[in-house]
């Protein structure tokens, strides 16, 4: 169990691409109710089952369990809402901060988000030049929202993300 | 992963009580959507997280993972719908068949259900004398239904279960 405190930003430009290695993520959601989510994820040939509680401020309870890869694949195939979330995650360290940059594919192609996990809600961070507008708390950018309202279907998608 | 094929019955009389040992179960549901459930269970001082798919006929997909007891307790406390399901499970072997008899407590006190898991949908079983009316497929007796509509609140509870 962990308490997850994070901030989320749009990404601008391509300067971040050379700063980290990408890993393919495929994930889906089972029985999402409000903020409370049950997520199945396959990343780097490993399976995970993750439960998250409601968001309070920037924080939420998170429980993650490794599960057999074959079962994770079957859960994605048989039980998860469609479309699945497919993205490449780049892990980028800048100063003492680790950024996770998610480049989405499939129905969310064109969207690139950067997340940073904080030690506490007051932690100050320096924003690299490739960090754009903050979207923490904007529900449209929740991965669960991107299942029901994928980025490529946003009417104003072109103006949302600087390229 | 398993495919669960089961039949469920009401229980009559007390003859079953001497046939098996009881174990306390405490369980709750996170983000139930229709038949698809995510269950947290504490049984015999161990924690489990179980995902079940929609029921098709008498069968449904089931994935169960052991999780740390302390995390299971916290999930029950913080993330699961109220009321929790509290019951004593008796495991009773009759001939080649293993019966699970659940005696409910708390908001579902008075309800006693027996379940049997089948090898396949066609398997014939002998019903012991303490087995009453079959309630397979009756959604009121789903554990998830007993959260939202506990047995003690059923208007006709008195006539449902022979005592």
Image (cartoon, coloured by chain):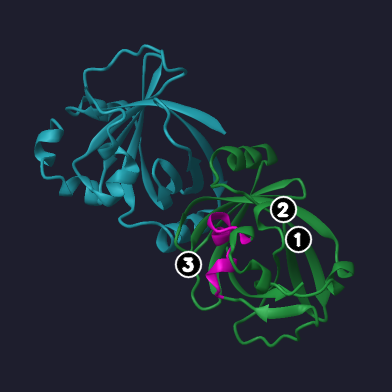
Chain colours: A cyan, B green
Which quadrant: the C terminus of chain A?
top left
Q: Quadrant of the N terminus of chain A?
A: top right
Read off the residue under disc 2: B25
Q: CA distance from mark 3 to mark 2?
A: 23 Å
| Front position in the image: B41 or A22 | B41
Q: Of marks 1 and 3, which one's residue comes earlier in the chain?
A: 3
Q: Which residues are magenta?
A: B137-151
Point out the tag, 3 or 2, that comes first from the N-terminus.
Answer: 2
For the point 27% across and 32% down, the residue is A138
Q: Residue B150 lies in magenta, yes or no?
A: yes
| Residue B68 in picture, x, y percent from top left | 67, 41
N-terminal of the pair, mark 1 or mark 2, is 2
* Residue at 51 percent of width and 28 percent of height: A3
Q: Are marks 1 and 2 in contact (CB under 8 Å)?
A: yes
Instruction: State whether residue B160 is above or below residue B105.
Output: below
Residue drawn at (54%, 38%) of the image = A63
Report, in whole angstroms, how far the alpha carbon at label 1 lies from the one at label 3. Answer: 24 Å
| Residue position marked by numbered label 3 in the rendering | B54
Q: Is residue A121 above or below residue A111?
A: above
Dots 1 and 3: beta carbons under 8 Å?
Answer: no
Q: Is residue A154 magenta?
A: no
Q: Secondary structure at mark 3?
A: loop
Let me know if residue A44 appears in the view: no
Can you give x and y, in whole percent of width and height, for residue B132 in the image? 72, 79
Question: Which residue bears the numbered disc 1?
Answer: B89
């Amino acid at each position: 169990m962990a308490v997850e405190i994070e901030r989320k930003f749009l990404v601008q430009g391509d300067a971040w691409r050379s700063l980290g290695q990408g890993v393919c993520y495929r994930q889906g959601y089972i029985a999402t109710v409000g903020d409370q989510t049950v997520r199945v994820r396959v990343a780097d040939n490993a399976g995970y089952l993750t439960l998250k509680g409601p968001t309070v401020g920037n924080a939420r309870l998170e429980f993650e369990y490794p599960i057999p890869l074959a079962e994770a694949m079957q859960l994605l195939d048989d039980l998860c809402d469609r479309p699945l979330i497919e993205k490449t995650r780049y892990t980028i360290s800048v100063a003492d901060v680790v950024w996770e940059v998610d480049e989405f594919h499939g129905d969310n192609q064109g969207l690139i988000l950067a997340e940073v996990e904080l030690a506490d809600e007051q932690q100050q961070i320096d924003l690299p030049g490739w960090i754009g507008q903050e979207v923490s708390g904007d529900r449209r950018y929740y991965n669960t929202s991107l299942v029901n309202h994928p980025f490529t279907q946003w009417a104003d998608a072109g103006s949302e993300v600087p390229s």
